[in-house]
Image: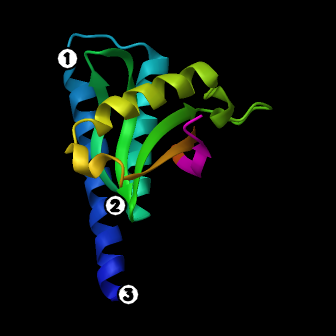
């Protein structure tokens, strides 16, 4: 079993490196569109978090999930055992006095809660009440081409 887990981590690492290589190739070719540096940082952090959570046995089922009924998006939605997790990812390129996770303020929490309610309505009504929901926050620090992670399961509650 240990060997299977190690092989799975190697496969996840290979996928992550492959996507990074494709990013470099597409940057050299040029797409003609310019994306603001802070948005690029956020997208890189979300992708790094996706792979890190996968290594931690989360099963990611949605990325950047949106609804026409409400503004905003949920960075990642994943199953972690019996928990359906709505994950907010905050990325920084340096550590500061104020940690990345502190940027998930009450307005952001309310938006994620609202989107979670909408997402849960996609399940059959008979199942909705039995789904255990958790709100996680992942802080990603991209420093010197190395990603550091801090994962906060159950970072905030429904109310």
- The local secondary structure at tag 2 comes to helix
Residue wearing tag 1: 31
Q: Residue furthest front?
A: 126
Residue sitting nearer the eye, 146 or 12: 12
**As drawn, 52 above or below 141:** below
Q: Which mark is residue 13?
A: 2
Label 1 near label 3: C-beta < 8 Å?
no
Q: Give the number of the disc on residue 2.
A: 3
The front one of 82 and 33 is 82
In three-dimensional space, the C-alpha distance between marks 3 and 1, rounded to whole angstroms, equals 42 Å
Q: Is residue 44 rendered to the left or right of residue 145?
A: left
Label located before the other in sequence (1 or 2): 2
Magenta range is 147-159
The answer to whether 42 appears left or right of 59 in the picture is right
Percent across and percent down for residue 108 are: 54, 23
Badge 1 marks a residue whose secondary structure is: loop
Q: Can residue 41 be seen in the rendering of this structure?
A: no
Near mark 2 (Cα within 10 A), the count class, few <14, some 14-19 or many ≥20, is some
User: In this view of the protein, which residue sits in the foreground, 95 or 130?
Assistant: 130
In front: mark 3 or mark 2? 3
Give the label, 1 or 2, closer to the camera.
2
> Can you give x and y, in whole percent of width and height, for residue 41 in the image?
47, 28
Mark 3: few, some, or many residues within 10 Å (few <14, many ≥20)?
few
**Viewer can see residue 33:** yes
Tag 1 or tag 3, which sits nearer the N-term? 3
């Amino acid at each position: 079993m240990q060997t299977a887990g190690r092989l799975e981590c190697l496969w996840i690492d290979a996928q992550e490196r492959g996507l990074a290589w494709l990013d470099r190739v597409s940057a050299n070719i040029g797409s003609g569109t310019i994306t603001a540096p802070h948005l690029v940082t956020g997208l890189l952090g979300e992708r790094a978090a996706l792979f890190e959570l996968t290594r931690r046995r989360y099963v990611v089922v949605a990325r950047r999930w949106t609804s026409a009924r409400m503004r905003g998006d949920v960075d990642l939605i994943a199953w972690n055992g019996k928990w359906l997790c709505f994950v907010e990812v905050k990325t920084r390129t340096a550590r500061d006095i104020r940690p990345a996770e502190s940027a998930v303020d009450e307005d952001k929490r309310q938006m994620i809660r609202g989107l979670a309610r909408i997402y849960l309505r996609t399940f059959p009504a008979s199942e909705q009440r039995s789904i255990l929901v958790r709100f996680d926050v992942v802080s990603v620090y991209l420093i010197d081409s190395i990603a550091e992670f801090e994962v906060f399961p159950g970072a905030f509650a429904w109310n």
